[in-house]
């Protein structure tokens, strides 16, 4: 059975930031948050815009999200980039990470791996897990930076230790293949399990393979079947196939 190996750039973080600040503006910000949570975007948008224009980073980030999603305003990646950048330049980690994604995808801006790395690194250094994982991918693939498996492992581990699923999976792949780290089936199984527990289909599949082959864990074909089933339920065609094979063999 073949271990799946995939590297993913995370999607934009979409949670509205909820940071309080000065008193009068604080009430306005709270009203904007409340309106947004009630999906009253037409009320939230002008409040965030006013505060963003006054230089508040949280509001700049939230305004960028609304432009990116077309909430209360005509969707505009260019405007999203504009406001992400305003917040990012103030050191706002969420905005730095999202700006990195925009550069990575070429959304609202000319695609640039170097700029993506630049902003991922800014957010990663502040402990932002999404950016740490994405920076790991960039090092892993040598995009926008000199390729380095060791640096990839370093950043994957930072994000994985914060419970970031994609990073846990990618770190498992690195241990499985011995890239940037001493090969270890036990460590591969450990990180695949962490991601599998969060419902990540490829991790469930890979952990199933390890249980089936007895690599890094005690061989348990029934456990393998269970994991393949979970992987199948989460959309893995390979998981469905392996589950079916074991089911036909009478494995319970």
Image (cartoon, grey):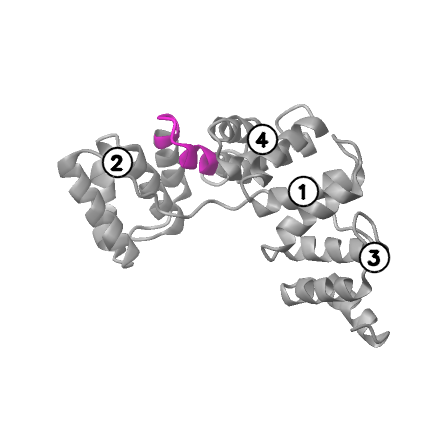
Q: Is residue 164 visible?
A: yes
Image quadrant assignment for residue 80: top left
Spatial CA distance of label 1 from label 3 is 23 Å
Q: Is residue 196 above or below residue 226?
A: above
Kindly identify which numbered label has been placed on residue 52: 2
Q: Which residue is depicted at the point 76% across and 44% down?
A: 186
Q: Is residue 85 left or right of residue 55?
A: right
Spatial CA distance of label 2 from label 4 is 28 Å
Sequence order check, earlier mark of 4 and 1: 4
For disc 4, the marked residue is 113
Disc 2, disc 1: CB below 8 Å?
no
Magenta segment: does it hold 81? no
Kindly identify which numbered label has been placed on residue 219: 3
For disc 1, the marked residue is 170
Residue neighbourhood size for the residue with mark 2, other residues' Cα within 10 Å, grouped as few (<14), some (14–19), many (≥20): many
Query: In the rendered structure, which segment of residues is drawn in magenta?
Result: 87-99
Task: Identify the secondary structure beneath mark 4.
Answer: helix
Which of label 1 and label 3 is nearer to you?
Answer: 3
Give coordinates of residue 33: x percent, y percent: 26, 49
Disc 4, disc 1: CB below 8 Å?
no
Disc 2, disc 4: CB below 8 Å?
no
Spatial CA distance of label 3 from label 4 is 42 Å
Disc 3, disc 4: CB below 8 Å?
no
Q: Is residue 198 left or right of residue 210?
A: left
């Amino acid at each position: 059975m073949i271990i799946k190996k995939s590297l993913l750039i995370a999607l934009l973080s979409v949670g509205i930031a909820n940071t309080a600040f000065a008193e009068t503006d604080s009430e306005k910000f709270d009203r904007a948050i409340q309106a947004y949570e009630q999906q009253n975007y037409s009320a939230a948008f002008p409040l965030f815009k006013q505060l963003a224009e006054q230089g508040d980073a949280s509001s700049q980030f939230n305004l960028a999200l609304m432009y990116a999603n077309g909430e209360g305003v005509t969707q505009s990646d260019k405007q999203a980039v504009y406001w992400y950048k305003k917040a990012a330049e103030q050191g706002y980690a969420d905005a730095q990470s999202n700006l990195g994604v925009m550069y990575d995808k070429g959304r609202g801006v000319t695609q640039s791996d170097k700029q993506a790395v630049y902003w991922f690194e800014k957010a990663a250094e502040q402990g932002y897990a999404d950016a740490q994982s994405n920076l790991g991918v960039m090092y892993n693939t040598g995009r926008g930076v000199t390729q380095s498996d060791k640096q990839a492992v370093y950043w994957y581990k930072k994000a994985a230790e914060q419970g970031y699923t994609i990073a846990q999976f990618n770190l498992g792949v690195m241990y499985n293949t011995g890239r940037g780290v001493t090969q270890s089936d036990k460590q591969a199984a450990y990180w695949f399990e962490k991601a599998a527990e969060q419902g990540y289909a490829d991790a469930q599949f890979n952990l199933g393979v390890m249980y089936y082959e007895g690599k890094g864990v005690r061989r348990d074909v029934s456990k393998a079947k269970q994991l393949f089933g979970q992987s199948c339920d989460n959309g893995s065609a390979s998981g469905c196939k392996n589950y079916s094979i074991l089911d036909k063999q009478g494995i319970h």
